[in-house]
Image (spheres, rainbow, N blue to C red):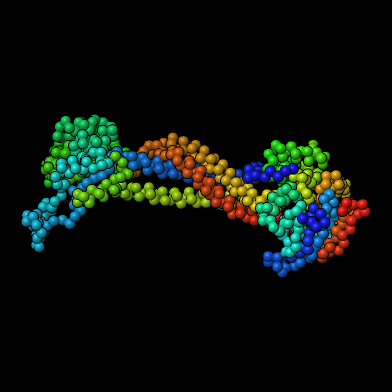
Amino acid sequence: MPPRKTQASGIRTVLFVALRQLWARKLLNGVALSGVSLGVLVLITMNGILHGFQEKFTESVLKISPHVSILDTEVRAPSTLLSQFEQTVVAAHVLHESPWERQTRIKRPRELARAIATIPGVEAVAPSVAGIATLDYGGKTQSVDLRGIEVSAQERVTPLEACVLEGKMSALEGSTDTVALGRSLATEMGVHVGSVVHALALGGRPLDLKVVAIYESGIPRVDRVRAYTLLRTAQVLLGKPDIIGRMEIRLADPADAMVVAEQLEVALGYDAESWQEANANFLSIFKMFGTIISFGISAILLVGGFGILAVQVMIVLQKQRDIAILRSIGLRQEDVLQIFLLQGIVISLVGGLIGDGLAKIAIHYLAQLKIKAEGFMKTDIFLVNDDPKMYVYGLAFALFVGVTASMIPAWRAAKVEPVDVLRGQIG
Amino acid sequence: MSEKGGILEARNICRSLGGTDGEGGHPVLRDISFSVPRGQFVALTGASGSGKSTLLYLLGALDRTSSGEIWLDGVEFGTLDDDERAEFRNEKLGFVFQFHFLLPEFTALENVAIPMMRRGLSRDESEERAYAMLSLLGLEALYAREPGQLSGGEQQRVSIARAIANEPKLILADEPTGNLDSENASQVVQIFRTLAHEHGRTVIMVTHDQHFADLADRRIALKDGQIVSDISAPGASV
């Protein structure tokens, strides 16, 4: 018989031997495979849950919050009262400066808004004023975060109209004595569209405001305390005539908010806050959960990897004689290495695919679960993110774990010297 | 190549065990030299610990000599690296062991076909030839059985079929009859004789059994790692 050895003949033999031996040890390999499947299942579902809630929170926050807010707090060293009059550097200052004399406004807001609107990536700018007011209705008094807005400009920054349950945000423009309330706030006070609430704030003029809209943003802390009126109404109510205290900005890409906020802060000298900064405490919770989940998933995958390692090491120890036979009939060390590596790859690949399938089913059923959650985010369904990328990552992780775990036993199998085994067996 | 034209030639081979890199250690084989021509059936005899199995592993390119040379079909083993030795075993050598040593997950047919697949034949072609080999040994009806479903004698015949699968120059058998009843053992020895005399294969068989050793063309006896006698049967090919 003429020798016709090729690279393909080696691979063909390796495949044939590896797959047959794998199939012959179904129970043992099934245990290793289950570990991998479980790891991938947990990886995908836990990530899906975390990202599902995080995305819903982010979506809700971005619906009601501007991407960047410029506040009336100057970040540069405050100028002294005397320097404002002298228009130059002075070596003296006035002691006991009264709070009302401090500069708490954004200067030349219209020009600033026009300038900000020209910055690349900025989609819309809306000036507003904010302050604390109290609303009184039927003997019930609630403290509210009052926002004075220009409805059409604000709508371009934070599309509130889509959140309205009763009435219309645009109805705010119909009269100066109107207000829009969050649903929880309205429920707490017992008001409906058409109700007239009495509003007052320190230093301002009390007003009777007609409720024209009730909205629900999905963020309980907003829906419980925030009230919207026209800009000029809020200015009167809060005693801040002609004052613009906030400049809210919408960006083409919310992910750029931190960079833009930093640039605006440096350029304008006012405190500029990104939506991430404004919600840092909540986002940090997700980050912390993410870290905890990552540890959990890593531990499970590690256990899956150890499963493969333990099974493979056991098989290598049991199969010394078979390895010696294979080597004696002409398989090279490399062929033996490939047989065990291939078995690890197949276990992890099949385990990963089963894990993917189980995760798909788990996510499908989790997404149908009805829950009632109203903490920092309101939802009545279980939020799960079904991202196809996670299935690919799951498979990739499984392969990584499988190949890594197979390395040691495969290397050990390849190093088996047939003569040592045969000498031991036969004597 | 052998000076005497033999297919296999051992020249002054020594093997020590327990030392480092062949140095020191306990000498198992000392200054072994012999030559075996094509088609000869040789029995290697000796007491336990005489070094016959060690010599067989050296002749089978499974182990390395401490010193000396082994030539087979014009190739000296010492010049080959591990991969080349593996290919050499696949193409030129066939092994039969005492405990049959078949791969338990594979059928008789597949056990015989694997060396041929490794050599480069397709699976279909390998299995076709493997079936022919099994038929030659009267096992065609058992081709689909796994080793666990075969008797000891049948398993040993399957391992002989595997050993001759790639039409090797040299067949090495380590106590092939040691685990068989007398009828099966006789049958196995008869197969080796046929392979040597009718198919031109060189066969070296390690055995304890004097009766089966007497059936060989030549008997090489070892004692304490040295050849103490080398007797050819009358009329045997040399």
Task: Name the side, left or right, on which B179 lies relative to A20.
Answer: right
The reply to whether residue A215 is in sight is no
Task: Name the side, left or right, on which A256 lies relative to A3.
Answer: left
Residue drawn at 29 percent across, 48 percent down: A258
Name the quadrant containing residue A188: top left
The reply to whether residue B72 is in sight is yes
Name the residue at the bottom extreme: B24
Residue A320, x across and y down, in percent? 69, 53
> Quadrant where the N terminus of chain B lies?
bottom right
Name the residue at the left extreme: A86
Residue drawn at 70 percent across, 36 percent down: B124
Question: Which of A221 and B172 lies nearest the eye of the viewer?
Answer: B172
Name the quadrant containing residue B50: bottom right
Question: Which of A359 and A76 lies nearest the eye of the viewer?
Answer: A76
Residue B7, x across and y down, in percent? 80, 53
Name the residue at the right extreme: B234
Task: Name the side, left or right, on which B75 lies relative to A22.
Answer: right
Task: Name the side, left or right, on which A21 lies relative to A396.
Answer: right
Residue drawn at 21 percent across, 40 percent down: A117
Count of marks placed on residues: 0
Name the quadrant containing residue A77: bottom left
Residue A416, x across and y down, in percent? 67, 55
Residue drawn at 73 percent across, 61 percent down: B65
